Image (spheres, rainbow, N blue to C red):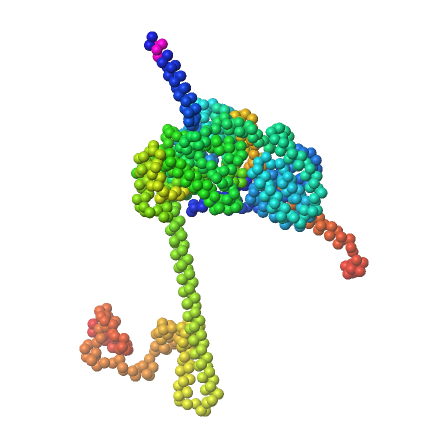
Amino acid sequence: MPRQSTRTKKPATKAAEPEKVEKVVEEKPQKEQKKRGRKPKQVVEETPVEDKMEVEEEQKEEETTTQTKADEQQPEQQEGAGSDSEEGSDDEEDNDLDLDALDESDSDSEFERDLNEKQSAAGIQANKYQKAAEESSDEEEDEDEIDIDELDVDGEEGEEVKAISKARQTINNKQGLLMALKRFALDTTDKVPFAFHQSIVAKKVTEESIPSIDDDLARELAFMNQALEAARVGRALLRKEGVPFTRPTDYFAETLRSDETMEKVKAKLIEEATAKKASAEARKQRDLKKFGKQVQVAKQQERAKQKRDTLEKINLLKKKRKDGGGPTGANEAEDLFDVAVDNELKGGPGGNNSKKRGRDGKEGGGPNAKRQRKDAKFGFGGKKKYAKSNDAMSSGDVSGFSARKMKSGGDRGRAGGPGGGKPPAKKFKPAPRPGKARRKAGAGKR
Amino acid sequence: MAAVYKSLSKSAKKVEDTEENDNNTTNGGFRKNKQRVLILSSRGVTYRHRHLLNDLAAMLPHGRKDVKFDSKSKLYQLNELAELYNCNNVMFFEARKGKDLYMWFSKVPNGPTVKFHAQNLHTMEELHFTGNCLKGSRPLLSFDLAFEQEPHYRVIKEVFLQMFGIPQGARKSKPFVDHVMSFSIADGKIWVRNYEVREVEKAKGEKDSEGNDIPEEKSSSKKRKSAPNAELFKDTDVSLVEIGPRFVLTPIIIQEGAFGGPIIYENKRFISPNQVRSELRKAKAGRHNARTEQVKERLGKLETLTAQAKKEKDVLDTRELFA
């Protein structure tokens, strides 16, 4: 269904959806049509142009291919002109022949003739440079065509002849049509009141105001303008005759489209509006985010730069010191500075740096506080054997000894008993474990 | 005696009636517009066709929707059917191949019949337009000027006028006019649109809020008066909002009779959708053929090349020398 005419109509109003879809579907076949447009033309070339009937046949064929669409033809021909020139003169010839045939072909309807002229104009423009080459061949056709034209122009008799000679394809019995019209037509002249028929014929031909049939907006606008003019005229006429026109606001009756449908339409509109709003919001947010990211990046870069600068400065100072003083001339202050610098380097001003080192775990500065504490608690590196055994220092240490505690009968919390109570404040160093004998004695006491 | 009197008086009355009719027609009168449209489809319509048919049926209070008609070849049977329903118009949707829709518009007793190919169907429901109008209100029919320029278009116009125009005082019609049906010709096709007429205040309206209401009431109350108070209306203008449905009709033939008789017009610009489809298929096949040909050509070339290579054996070739 998408082919033959189906240029999509996009409503001038919001409700464009159904057609949009159609358009997408359509694009492919149109391309295909363009391609196929060339084939039948070759057929035209092959058949000798002698007999009138054959001429007609050709015309018909051409029409099937080229005349399918007013809109398609132009692009097609232009494309044809482009690609034909590559293919060779043969094809070009057909192309031109076609156009001329179209141009010359009889046209019982002016409308059609206009269309043909338009086409040929476009075609001629495209193929101007090729024209001279095949004029001789054109002339043959011209003669045939002219004959037919003359027949046509003859009038009613000629019409009859034409109707017979053209067999099927060009029946347009104008007399018969008018007779038929007369038989059943209603009187719509000024004699009858307008309310009798309510029909208005526009003052302009609508097609003239449509620049391109594929331009949905322009086309629909043209249709609407026609209707709008009719509405204005009709309203004036009806009011003149005293026929009620507008529905009063308190007149309720069944409407063409049910409330349900209108509700749906409304919902759709609302949905559309909200979707639009949401998307706008989202875009805004996105932009903001993008901007925020830029700020963040800038900040990071700034920080990195700062760090680099300080490190450079430090290195510079170090170098200066090495060059200037040497080990002999080392001052106390400079030594201090050196330590500070080393610390600085170890600790690192940036969090990043320290983390990295922490992961490596090779630097003596220690990775992080937790690890450090754990290391301190459980030991890290070095010999673990005898780490807890007493030595001279520990045995000589009596800092945990308190006479007061001894007098008060022992520390309940310390003894590891169940009634522990408050753990001792961190400040105080836990008293070292009592000796075995004392412990036993304590146990015995309890 | 009574019977005789009755028959006499009846005949007298009849004579009077006919005289009256004659007077009507001769005086300033016109034929009464009595239309009834039989709306039906063939079998094999798609949902879209059906919905369009329903839309049109809803728009035509003088229409009579009937069940699907079983035959596609014996369309003259529709004449009898229409007679059965007292219809003098038939709007017949003929679906072919479950996709193509042809619409027959026929004036039943003695023609003419117009056959259209309908494309770009969009029903009222799927077009989400905001317009709405009363069910059964009489439309204004807006025709393109092109309808007056060609005899066949004139015939088509007349058919449209009688089918889509709701006759004055039709049974279920409403007394207001609130929509316009427009028929335009573009690209050799007839484009049908349906708009709601809305009254809006003019930009320079002096009576701001009341201006809109007052004339409406007046218009309804002062029905049969040649309105001298036209100035009252001047502060409103009309705007259009589309209602739907939309469709495009390509005239194919016009027959002189009702579903029969000689063909008095045939549109040679019409290409049947079957032909279009077959062309498409051919084009596709052509592409494939061209491709296979190319492959064949290439293979042939390869063959000749290899043959040549075999032939040209150099005596001084290392393979020859040290074989």
Identify which residue, A118 or B276, lies in the foreground: A118
Q: Residue at x 63, y 37 (%)?
A: A105
Q: Residue A76: give x, y in percent of width and height.
A: 60, 46
Q: Is residue B8 above or below residue A290?
A: above
Q: Residue at x 63, y 40 (%)?
A: A102
Question: In front: A31, or B226?
Answer: B226
Q: Is residue A440 left or right of residue B48?
A: left
Q: Is residue B6 magenta?
A: yes
A197 falls in the magenta region: no
Outermost residue, top side = B1
Q: Is residue A134 visible?
A: yes
The quarter of the picture where residue A388 lies is bottom left
Look at the picture and state if A385 lies above or below A211: below
Q: Is residue A18 visible?
A: no
Q: Is residue B18 left or right of residue A46?
A: left
Q: Residue at x 75, y 51 (%)?
A: B307
Dominant secondary structure of the magenta stretch? helix
Q: Residue at x 46, y 41 (%)?
A: A226
Image: magenta residue range: B3-7
- Report the residue that reaches farthest toward the bottom: A328
Q: Considering depth in this image, is A246 or B270 the residue closer to the camera?
A: A246
Closer to us: A415 or B251: B251
Can you give x and y, in whole percent of width and height, for residue A268 in the image?
A: 39, 46
- Looking at the rendered image, the quarter that the C terminus of chain A falls into is bottom left
The single residue placed furthest to the right in the displayed view is B315
Residue B235 location (% of width, % of height) = 35, 44
Above or below, A255 relative to A347? above
Q: Is residue A298 left or right of residue B206?
A: right
Q: Quadrant of residue B222?
A: top left
Provide residue A84's location: percent of width, then percent of height. Answer: 65, 48
Q: How many marks?
A: 0
